[in-house]
């Protein structure tokens, strides 16, 4: 029997042409014997723009649904995720060689951790990369540490939610991604952090593409009123979970 990592990708029309690059990065992954990946691609909408870019591979599952932003698309995609672990891969990003193996090694070697992240490099339009200069040390991330840092650094976490891998049962228990127009992955990261220890791998695990059409580059993403509301509900959810002292991830 093959053990699976379900790689979860939400995509909409403008970013669909990047899917082949994401696929190449998946093909470059080498996993231990007995492990493989499943790629769950969920279109945020029902158009003819995405399917032509979906690779013909039995490990790929493609679905469509009513448009509702990335959070809803990913959560709908969970209906087809069969893996013990769920790995985020945005349609316009790429995994680095060895990323999935490092993720898997961290979670299997530390069964008390519910999630893991890794270093990320921004991939600029000219092909150059820029790293984050405040990465935490590699190893265990204690419960509440990400929330504390996020609150003290103007809503910026010290680890990147686009690199998340998590245990599927924990992801489901938390309800998937937050139903927000943006910052839904940050909301999930903080929720994971307050109920479970995590892990940070200092090796670069993701190339995070910067391009004009990405959602985070749009003016609406920086709207002060919306951002304040997003951050308020993200923090309130994390604080509510943290206050439930008996609510803590305990692997079976």
Image (spheres, helix red, strand yellow):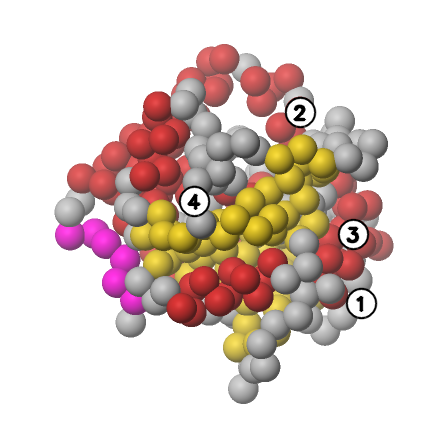
The front one of 166 and 183 is: 166
Callout 4: few (<14), some (14-19), or many (20+) C-alpha neighbours within 10 Å? Answer: few
Circle 2 residue: 217
Q: Secondary structure at mark 1?
A: loop
Q: Secondary structure at mark 3?
A: helix
Circle 1 residue: 56
Which residue occupies 49% across, 32% down?
134
**Residue 21 circle label:** 3
Circle 4 residue: 137
The front one of 242 and 132 is: 132
Which numbered disc flags the more N-terminal residue, 2 or 1? Answer: 1
Which residue occupies 47% across, 13% down?
225
Q: Are marks 3 and 1 in contact (CB under 8 Å)?
A: no
Overall secondary structure of the magenta stretch? Answer: loop
Image coordinates of residue 69 in percent, x first then y, are 58, 38
Image coordinates of residue 242 in percent, x first then y, are 23, 41
> What residue range appears in magenta?
246-251
Mark 4–mark 2 Cα distance, whole angstroms, equals: 29 Å
The front one of 211 and 106 is: 106
Q: Is residue 166 visible?
A: yes
Mark 4–mark 3 Cα distance, whole angstroms, equals: 30 Å
Taking the image as shown, residue 8 lies to the left or right of residue 225, namely: right
Image coordinates of residue 215 in percent, x first then y, are 65, 30
């Amino acid at each position: 029997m093959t053990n699976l990592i379900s790689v979860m990708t939400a995509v909409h029309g403008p970013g669909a042409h990047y899917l082949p690059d994401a696929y190449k990065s998946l093909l470059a992954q080498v996993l231990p014997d007995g492990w493989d990946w499943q790629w769950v691609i969920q279109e945020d909408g029902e158009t003819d723009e995405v399917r032509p870019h979906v690779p013909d591979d039995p490990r790929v599952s493609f679905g469509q649904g009513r448009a509702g932003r990335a959070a809803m698309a990913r959560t709908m995609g969970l209906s087809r995720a069969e893996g013990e672990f769920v790995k985020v891969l945005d349609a316009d990003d790429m995994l680095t060689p060895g990323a999935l193996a490092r993720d898997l090694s961290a979670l299997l070697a530390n069964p008390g951790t519910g999630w893991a992240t890794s270093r990320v490099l921004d991939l600029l339009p000219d092909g150059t990369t820029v790293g984050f200069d405040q990465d935490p040390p590699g190893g265990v991330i204690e419960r509440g540490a990400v929330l504390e840092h996020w609150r003290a650094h103007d809503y910026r976490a010290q680890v990147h939610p686009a690199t998340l891998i998590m245990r599927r049962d924990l992801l489901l228990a938390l309800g998937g991604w937050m139903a927000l127009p943006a910052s839904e992955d940050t909301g999930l990261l903080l929720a994971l952090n307050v109920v479970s220890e995590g892990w940070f791998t200092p090796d670069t695990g993701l190339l995070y593409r910067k391009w004009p059409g990405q959602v985070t580059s749009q003016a609406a993403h920086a709207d002060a009123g919306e951002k304040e509301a997003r951050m308020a509900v993200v923090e309130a959810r994390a604080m509510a979970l943290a206050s439930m002292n008996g609510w803590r991830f305990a692997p079976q």
